[in-house]
Every structure is written in C-alpha cells, then in structure tokens.
Image (cartoon, helix red, strand yellow):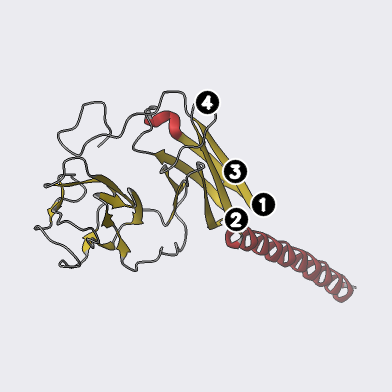
C-alpha cells in the first residue's frame, strides 16, 4: 500500500514539475520574442501651420539599458563644404564616430568649433587636407568658418545608436529598433519650443511601425550665426 501511494505521489510530482517547466519555457520564449522583435519608428515634425520642419534630429534612448546594444556604423561620416555652405547643414552621428571635412568649394575655408562637446580648428585649406576629427563626447557641436561669417553647421553627437534627421517634409524613420520603452528627444536649429515639451515616450512591442509626432507651438527661429551665442540659444 505504501508503495502504491509513493508511486502515485511521484507521478503527481512529475506532472507538476512538467507543468512548471513548460510555464518557465513559455515565459522565456515570450521574453525572448519581445526582446528580439524590432520595429521602425516613424517620426513627423510639424510647425504651427502643419508644415513639415526639416533638419530636426530625433534620438531614441532606451528607458532601460539593453543587454546588448548594436553600435551604429562607425565608418567615417562626412561634413562637406560647397557654395560657402556646410553640407549637410545638420549631421547626426553616434559618439566615437570620426568625421571628415572635405572642402569641395571654389574658395578656401577655415573650419572651427568652440562648442564644449568638441573644440577644434582646421587651418585654412581646400580639398582634403586634414585627417578626420573624432567626436567622442555626446552633445551639440556648432561649426563656423573664420573666413565666411555666414557659414554655420551643426553636428549632433548622440550616445544612442537610434537616431534620425527629418527630411524636407519633416519626416524621418529609425529602423530596426528593438522592443522596449524609449525616450525620444528632438532638437533642431530653428526649433524654439522648450526642450521639455519636445520629449516623447513610446513603447515598442509587437508592432512593425510606431509613429511619434511633434506639433511645434512657437514660430521657427531664423538661422543663427556661429559667433557669440544669444542666451536664448541651446548651444
């Protein structure tokens, strides 16, 4: 009799252990599926009249540190100079990215930055006379030319590998963003809205695309000069 009871108890314990194991495996699979699913962030920035705002940088930072964050491409980025302008006027890169500053203009330029995130100066040149400059500190870097005061460019250095810059219609996409909660921060050289109003929070879980939109409340600023900054500017 004791042997029969013992056998029954063993079978019950085995069934319970099996159910627990199946439950744990299902939870692990669900967590893995959540963590490995990637989505595209669709970004839209509009002014007060509903027009798209170009050259707005949006950076998506994970609310919780990821187990492994794939780095953005660390190949050399390019900030060119053409027709006495920086091209592109706004460039966004991940920290650690080297940037080259070729001068494909018909005149010489002397590129500089006084920004705390990266101070440097390239002596007067044309062509590709200088080695790429490394940008290892996150933040905004404002560029100028000592020869042409009306030239201004911006390099936004982000710690996160997930970022984009809006096109001429005010739209952008950040592809392959892993599932999770993210804080979205927007910045643009002509955006006058307070920084705290430009923050968005999104959760990516299962959807292929998630949209985030900014509708600015203040009029756009004129393009500033790279010289001594006004206290109202954010750089």
Q: Which residue is mark 1?
A: 207
- Identify which residue, 110 or 142, lies in the foreground: 110
Q: Position of residue 194 (x, y in %)?
A: 38, 27
Figure quadrant of residue 235: top left
Real-space Cα distance between discs 2 and 1?
6 Å
What mark, if any, has residue 39 been given in the picture? 2
Q: Which residue is mark 3?
A: 211
Q: Are the two marked residues, 3 and 4, in contact with CB atoms closer than 8 angstroms? A: no
Q: Can the viewer see residue 140?
A: no
Q: Position of residue 85 (x, y in %)?
A: 27, 49
Q: Closer to the camera: disc 2 or disc 4?
A: 4
Q: Closer to the camera: disc 3 or disc 1?
A: 3
Q: Are the two marked residues, 3 and 1, in contact with CB atoms closer than 8 angstroms? A: no
Looking at the image, residue 65 lies above or below residue 73: above
Sequence-wise, which precedes: disc 3 or disc 4? 4
Sequence-wise, which precedes: disc 4 or disc 1? 4
What mark, if any, has residue 121 been given in the picture? none
Q: Which residue is mark 4?
A: 49
Real-space Cα distance between discs 3 and 1?
10 Å
Looking at the image, residue 189 lies above or below residue 219: below
Q: Are the two marked residues, 2 and 1, in contact with CB atoms closer than 8 angstroms? A: yes
User: Label 2's element?
Assistant: strand
Instruction: Give the residue at x 86% y 76%.
Output: 3
- Identify which residue, 67 or 112, lies in the foreground: 112
User: Label 3's element?
Assistant: strand
Sequence-wise, which precedes: disc 2 or disc 1? 2
As drawn, the residue found furthest toward the front would be 106
Q: Is residue 231 found left or right of 122 in the rendered image?
A: right
């Amino acid at each position: 009799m004791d042997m029969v009871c013992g056998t029954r108890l063993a079978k019950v314990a085995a069934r319970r252990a099996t159910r627990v194991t199946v439950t744990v495996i299902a939870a692990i699979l669900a967590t893995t599926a959540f963590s490995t699913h990637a989505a595209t962030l669709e970004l839209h920035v509009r002014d007060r009249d509903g027009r798209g705002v170009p050259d707005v940088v949006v950076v998506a930072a994970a609310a919780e540190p990821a187990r492994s964050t794939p780095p953005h491409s660390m190949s050399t980025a390019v900030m060119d100079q053409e027709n006495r302008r920086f091209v592109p006027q706004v460039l966004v890169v991940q920290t650690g990215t080297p940037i080259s500053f070729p001068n494909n203009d018909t005149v010489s330029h002397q590129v500089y930055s006084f920004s705390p995130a990266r101070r440097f100066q390239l002596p007067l040149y044309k062509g590709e006379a200088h080695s790429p400059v490394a940008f290892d500190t996150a933040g905004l870097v404002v560029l100028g030319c000592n020869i042409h005061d009306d030239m201004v460019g911006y390099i936004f250095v982000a710690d996160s590998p997930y970022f984009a810059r809006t096109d001429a219609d005010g739209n952008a996409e950040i592809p392959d963003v892993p599932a999770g909660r993210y804080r979205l921060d927007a910045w643009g050289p002509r955006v006058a809205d307070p920084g705290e109003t430009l923050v968005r929070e999104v959760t990516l879980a299962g959807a292929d695309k998630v949209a985030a939109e900014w509708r600015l409340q203040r009029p756009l600023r004129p393009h500033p000069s790279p010289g001594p900054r006004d206290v109202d500017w954010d750089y």
